[in-house]
């Protein structure tokens, strides 16, 4: 297995996941929490990665563990708890187990965004009282 530095040097300029926009370069690869094209967040170049994505109910957290002599092992868990309990569970998986503590803030931000997107939208009540409302 090659080192993560070598892999990053090979893929940093050309790969199929790069999306270039004016002023910023994005990446669409799996397990990239910020969708930015950088070595820190890369799901391909790093041996240990964390991915947070939407599940039909809750949040799916994927952790990739790779050792030098064996192929990568991917373990995933679906967390269907409320927002604070989900944050605690992700913090336990990522930082407290000393897996990738530098990705904790990004993983929590991604899980919060996923949970917010799964909440039903509240309908705004239209005001029907007053002079202008009855005139229209």
Image (cartoon, rainbow, N blue to C red):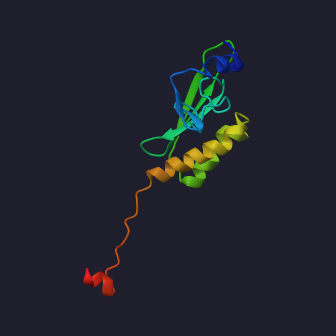
The residue lying furthest to the front in this view is: 22
Residue 125 vs residue 106: left or right?
left
Residue 117 vs residue 26: left or right?
left
Image point 54% across, 32% down: which residue? 20
Front-most of residues 122 and 82: 122
Locate residue 93: give its quadrant.
Answer: top right
Image point 34% across, 74% down: which residue? 126
Name the spot of residue 43 as percent of width and height, x first.
59, 28
Q: Quadrant of the C terminus?
A: bottom left
Q: Is residue 130 above or below residue 5?
A: below
Q: Is residue 45 above or below residue 86?
A: above
Front-most of residues 8 and 60: 8
Q: Quadrant of the N terminus?
A: top right
Image point 63% across, 16% down: which residue? 10
Q: Is residue 123 above or below residue 39?
A: below
Residue 68 vs residue 124: left or right?
right
Name the spot of residue 123 as percent of width and height, x first.
37, 65
Image point 64% across, 48% down: which residue? 88
Name the spot of residue 48 as percent of width and height, x first.
66, 27
Name the spot of residue 125 as percent of width and height, x first.
36, 72
């Amino acid at each position: 297995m090659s080192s993560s530095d070598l892999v990053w040097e090979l893929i940093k300029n050309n790969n199929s996941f790069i999306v270039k926009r004016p002023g910023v370069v994005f990446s669409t690869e799996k397990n990239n929490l910020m969708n930015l094209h950088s070595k820190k967040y890369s799901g391909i170049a790093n041996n240990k990665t964390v991915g947070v994505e939407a599940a039909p109910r809750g949040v799916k957290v994927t952790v990739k563990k790779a050792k030098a002599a064996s192929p990568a092992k991917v373990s995933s868990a679906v967390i269907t708890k409320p927002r604070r309990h989900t944050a605690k569970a992700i913090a336990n998986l990522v930082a407290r187990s000393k897996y990738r503590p530098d990705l904790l803030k990004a993983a929590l931000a991604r899980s919060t965004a996923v949970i917010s997107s799964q909440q039903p939208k509240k309908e705004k009540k239209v005001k029907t009282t007053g002079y202008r409302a009855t005139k229209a």
